[in-house]
Image (tube, rainbow, N blue to C red):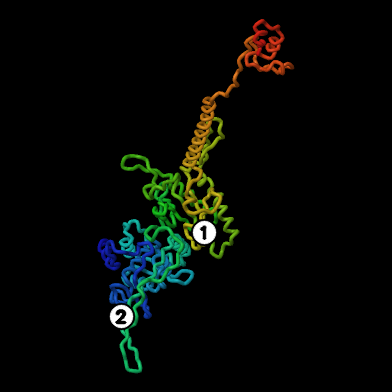
């Protein structure tokens, strides 16, 4: 019986395997709404049919099923903005919801507080949504029964958060080319004229703020069981979970806070999160593995999966009250997100250093719904508990003082020590290989007394000029000696 219902749901959606459907990021159906409130599109005639009297197309019905399969309860306007904001308005989505309701796939049980009608899926509609999203039926959760009767304020805030983070790129719908003829009356009579076809090129779309993920990247109202005894199975329920590995976010859990409960109640949820993250199980090889790894992919960062708290102050909470609430939650959860400091002594008399151990810590991020709606998820709208400024999502998720950062600092210190050692070795080698200073030439000694020839000049240097052989004293002595016979005959005195 269950299989027959799923086959029937798939026939209602009419999506071919592999065809472009509502899950493509920014995908929009090629259809338009006519003046009579009905829809035209490829493969579907003007107006409704017996099966779909409101004229919806398979593409738009697929958008609706995908959105409601994720959000559980939403308005036609929210479905429009999440899946195909390129449509002019949400008329096509309202028609699709009415057609799905005729086939018992969608149901409306009330209205939101702004007056818009709220829609959800029936059990048969969840089966159809599972076909569109490509998920097992067991992962679709249960229908949001009764949520619309009170206006679903929390569900509306979760939906707006998903829309603000995803920010599906608006693709304008392509106009339908008209080939009908019109009659132009002139003075000479009636002449048929053809209405010019619409331009083939689409109008330019202004650049929009980029988002993260697509409709199929989300899950909402995800329950995670906690260890408990007896029949009372406690659990922690996450408002929304985002899987966007292409944007560097393997998993990001969202808690949406409407500021209606006390800060102590909100902070108490994160203690239950850590209780769940600390649970262990064994794989088929008997190895111990955290339970959360069986549900979510690795984060490639030290610590548990990050949790983003989206505060929705609305008109009830002022700016200062919101700051006080954030600071209160930050202080109450400090032990959960701060980790533990591991001190490491510096080698060789260097100052002691260390790192922060995040193995048992939850990365906690704060933001507000107006910030996300104005600047998108990739702007500096995230405040990581423990950091000192508003950051982008990538910077906020990074652990700036963990063991990896310590390794980088230690490697930098090692390179600096190596550079200093090489510089000292270079100076030592240069000193050892330095050539000796040139020594002044030593003059030949005096041939007579052996004293240096460069003695201070004497008073008789004018009578005994230097001869390069005797010092001044010896030259004076030699000059004062009596002349020999040879000297007298040849006229040469000693010392000359």
Residue 179 bears which disc, if any? Answer: 2
Q: Nearer the viewer, residue 441 or 343?
A: 441
Residue 414 relative to residue 1: left or right: right
SS of the residue at dot 2?
loop
Quadrant of the snapshot with the N terminus: bottom left
Dot 2, how many residues are within 10 Å of its Cα: few (below 14), some (14-19), or many (20+)? few
Residue 444 relative to residue 194: left or right: right
x 57%, y 52%: residue: 328
In the depicted structure, whether residue 92 falls above or below residue 258: below
x 43%, y 51%: residue: 234
Q: Mark 1 or mark 2: which is in front?
A: 2
Residue 137 bears which disc, if any? Answer: none
Visible residue check, residue 426: yes
Horizontal and vertical percent for residue 302?
45, 44
Q: Earlier in the sequence, mark 1 or mark 2?
A: 2
Q: Nearer the viewer, residue 79 or 451?
A: 451
In the depicted structure, whether residue 172 falls above or below residue 412: below
Contact? badges 1 and 2 (CB < 8 Å) = no
Horizontal and vertical percent for residue 186?
35, 92
x 37%, y 80%: residue: 36
In the depicted structure, whether residue 374 falls above or below residue 98: above
- The residue positioned farthest toward the top in the image shown: 485
The residue labelled by disc 1 is 368
Dot 1, how many residues are within 10 Å of its Cα: few (below 14), some (14-19), or many (20+)? many
């Amino acid at each position: 019986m269950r299989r027959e219902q799923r086959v029937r749901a798939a026939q209602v959606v009419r999506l071919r395997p592999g065809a472009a459907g509502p899950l493509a990021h920014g995908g929009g159906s090629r259809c338009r709404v006519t003046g009579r409130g009905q829809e035209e599109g490829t493969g579907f005639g003007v107006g409704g049919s017996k099966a779909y009297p409101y004229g919806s197309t398979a593409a738009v019905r697929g958008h609706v099923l995908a959105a409601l399969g994720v959000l559980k309860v939403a308005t036609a306007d929210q479905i429009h903005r999440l899946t195909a904001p390129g449509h002019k308005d949400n008329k096509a989505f309202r028609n699709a919801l009415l057609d799905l309701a005729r086939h018992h796939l969608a149901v409306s049980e009330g209205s939101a507080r702004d007056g818009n009608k709220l829609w959800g899926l029936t059990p048969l509609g969840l089966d159809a949504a599972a076909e569109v999203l490509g998920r097992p039926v067991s992962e679709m959760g249960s229908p949001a029964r009764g949520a619309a009767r009170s206006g679903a304020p929390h569900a509306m805030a979760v939906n707006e958060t998903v829309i603000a983070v995803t920010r599906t790129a608006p693709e304008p719908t392509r106009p339908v080319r008209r080939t009908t003829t019109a009659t132009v009356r002139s003075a000479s009579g009636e002449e048929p004229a053809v209405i010019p076809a619409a331009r083939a090129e689409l109008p330019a779309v202004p650049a929009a703020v980029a988002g993260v993920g697509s409709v199929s990247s989300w899950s909402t109202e995800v329950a995670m069981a906690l260890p408990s005894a007896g029949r009372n199975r406690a659990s922690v329920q996450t408002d929304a979970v985002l899987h966007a590995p292409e944007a560097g976010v393997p998993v990001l859990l969202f808690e949406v806070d409407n500021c209606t409960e006390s800060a102590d109640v909100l902070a108490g949820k994160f203690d239950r999160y850590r209780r769940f993250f600390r649970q262990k199980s064994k794989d088929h090889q008997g190895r111990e593995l955290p339970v959360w790894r069986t549900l979510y992919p690795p984060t490639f960062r030290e610590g548990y999966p990050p949790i983003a708290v989206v505060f929705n102050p609305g008109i009830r909470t002022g700016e200062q009250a919101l700051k006080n609430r954030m600071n209160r939650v930050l202080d109450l959860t400090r032990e959960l997100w701060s980790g533990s400091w591991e001190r490491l002594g510096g080698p060789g008399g260097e100052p002691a250093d260390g790192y922060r151990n995040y193995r048992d810590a939850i990365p906690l991020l704060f933001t507000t719904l107006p910030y996300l709606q104005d600047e998108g998820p990739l702007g500096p709208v995230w405040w990581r508990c423990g950091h000192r400024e508003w950051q982008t999502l990538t910077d906020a998720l990074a652990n700036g003082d963990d063991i990896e950062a310590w390794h980088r600092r230690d490697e930098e210190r090692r390179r600096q020590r190596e550079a200093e050692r090489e510089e000292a070795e270079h100076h030592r080698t240069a000193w050892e290989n330095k050539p000796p200073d040139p020594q002044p030439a030593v003059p030949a000694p005096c041939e007579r007394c052996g004293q240096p020839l460069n003695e201070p000049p004497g008073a008789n240097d004018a009578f005994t000029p230097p001869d390069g052989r005797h010092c001044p004293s010896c030259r004076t002595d030699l000059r004062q000696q009596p002349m020999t016979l040879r000297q007298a005959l040849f006229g040469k005195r000693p010392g000359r």
